[in-house]
Image: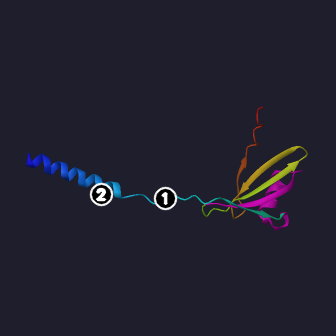
Amino acid sequence: MKKVLFVLVLIMAVLVVNAQTTNPPITKEKPLRTVVMVADLQKTITDNIAKDYVGYTIKEAASITANSIVPIEVVIVKGTITETLIYDKNGLFVKKLPPPTPIKK
C-alpha cells in the first residue's frame, strides 16, 4: 500500500511541475507598409519591369516589413490589366501575385 501511495504522490508531483512550465506567448508583429516613391525604386526593379513587362507603367510601390523581411511590392498597370509583383530587398524578382478573386454576391 505504501508503494501505491508513493507512486501516486510522485505522479502528482510530476503533473504539478509540468503544469507550471509555460511557453512564452508568441507575438506576431503587424506588417508595416511603407509607401515607396516610384523614382526611389532600385534600378534593377525598374529595369526588370521595362524588360519583362513592356508597355506597363508603375502605379505604386510599397515596402512591407514583417518578421525582419522587407519585400517590395510593385503594382503595374497596362490599360485595365493590373499586376502585382514582389521583389526582395536586393531588387531581385520573387513572384507575381495572382489577381484578386471577385467577391460573389
Q: Residue furthest top?
A: 105
Ranked by sequence position, the earlier of labels 2 and 1 is: 2
Quote the CA–CA distance across marks 2 and 1.
Answer: 19 Å
Bounds of the magenta segment = 38-66
Label annotation for residue 17: 2
Residue 14 lies in quadrant: bottom left
Mark 2 surroundings: few (<14), some (14-19) or many (≥20) residues within 10 A: few
x, y (%) of residue 1? 8, 45
x, y (%) of residue 31? 66, 59
Q: Residue furthest bottom?
A: 40
Give the labeled residue for mark 1: 25
Callout 1: helix, strand or loop? loop
Label annotation for residue 83: none
Mark 1 surroundings: few (<14), some (14-19) or many (≥20) residues within 10 A: few
> What residue is shown at x 24% (from left), y 51% (from top)?
12
Q: Name the residue type under label 1.
A: Pro
Q: Nearer the viewer, residue 24 or 73?
A: 24
